[in-house]
Amino acid sequence: MRITRRELLRLGAGAGLLSATGWNPLLAGSDEPILVTVPSSGVKIPAVGLGTVKFRGLVGSAEMDPFRDTLAAFHSGGGQLLDTSPNYGNSEAVLGHLLEGMGLREDVFMATKVDREERDEGIERMEGSFSRLGGPIDLMQVHNLRGTDVQLDTLFKWKDQGKVAHVGITTHRVSQHEDVERYMRTYPLDFVQVNYSLADRAAADRILPLAIDRGVAVLVNRPFGKGDLFAAVKGKDLPDWAADIDCTSWGQVFLKYIIGHPASTLPIPGTSKPHHALDNVAAMYGRLPDSALRAEMERLFDEEMVS
């Protein structure tokens, strides 16, 4: 069950997080999150996901507490998509354990990855993900284009069998964008995952327009430019236009820039801190920047990055 923002106000923990982030859920004028529609399936997903690369530790120990609190904040704010990988330490095992204990496993859109060259090794790797995550895989992605053709052959067969719902590929390297393009033209992909932010706009040149043309949804990693964006605006007040798109933090501005792109873009900022998770999901409420404001954002941050 997804909780509305007004209901979140009645949650004691949520209220504390709201105070910490400065997010007033009544400002944006809507209790419903912005949804991104997956073009190939019509599935609608709340517009900010959660990257879980830092979710590592001894399952069942006190090390799980901040991860549990982060998942609770993310879910209470309306978040649904979780992105993980078997090469993120034991992130999958951590998520599987926590989600089952919290009763949330059936209320998330689970995305993970396969990172093996050989067919049999890939199948074994993916079967391990099903076991660790303890439920359906909504999106299986070929990680950093490793063994792409071999793994996609398996995945499209599994999709036909209903074993996975969506198929995708990922990279965090601009040097692989040409290969991503080629795979987008060759296969009926449901998702691609690429790096994109105000600090790194290379994907907007060809990947994002092609995603629109091919009907491919886009998960966006490194939405804060590996921290470069926060460094550029450190100590600076939000511009007046931030209120016009219902933003109360720079993080929300950076995420709304991505969500506002005309492609089906869904940023997946990684965090293991509850107040950051809640601040991030606040970006999927209220108004989005139009093309003119997105251009103004680019101009502003180009100036800030070189000043």
Image (cartoon, rainbow, N blue to C red):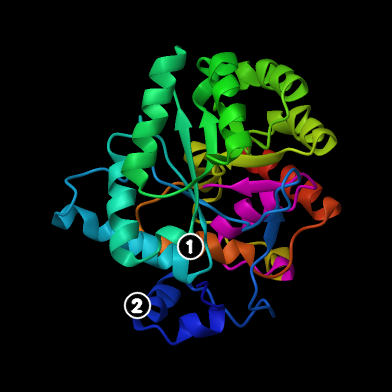
* Residue matched to label 2: 13
Please state if 175 lies on the left or on the right of 241 as rendered.
Answer: left
Q: Residue at x 37, y 26 (%)?
A: 125
Q: Quadrant of the C terminus?
A: top right
Q: On residue 188, which mark appears?
A: none
**Residue 23, placed above or below residue 84:** below
Q: Give the residues in magenta.
A: 244-268
Q: Position of residue 98 (x, y in %)?
A: 29, 57
At mark 2, the secondary structure is helix
Please state if 268 lies on the left or on the right of 303 as rendered.
Answer: left
Q: Position of residue 239 (x, y in %)?
A: 67, 62
| Magenta stretch holds residue 263 | yes
| Magenta stretch holds residue 164 | no
Residue sitting farthest toward the bottom: 10
- Are discs 2 and 1 less than 8 Å apart at CB? no
Q: Position of residue 290 (x, y in %)?
A: 82, 56
**Residue 279, placed above or below residue 173:** below
Q: Residue at x 22, y 55 (%)?
A: 64
Residue sitting farthest toward the front: 161
- Which circle's residue, 2 or 1, is located before the other in the chain? 2
Q: Nearer the viewer, mark 2 or mark 1?
A: 1
In the image, 14 versus 108, the foreground residue is 108
- From where the camera sits, is residue 222 visible? no
At mark 1, the secondary structure is helix
Q: Residue at x 46, y 15 (%)?
A: 119
> In the rendered structure, which amino acid carries the disc numbered 1?
Asp
Neighbourhood count class around disc 1 (C-alpha, 10 Å): few under 14, some 14–19, many 20 upward? some
Q: Position of residue 140 (x, y in %)?
A: 52, 35
Q: Residue at x 50, y 73 (%)?
A: 1
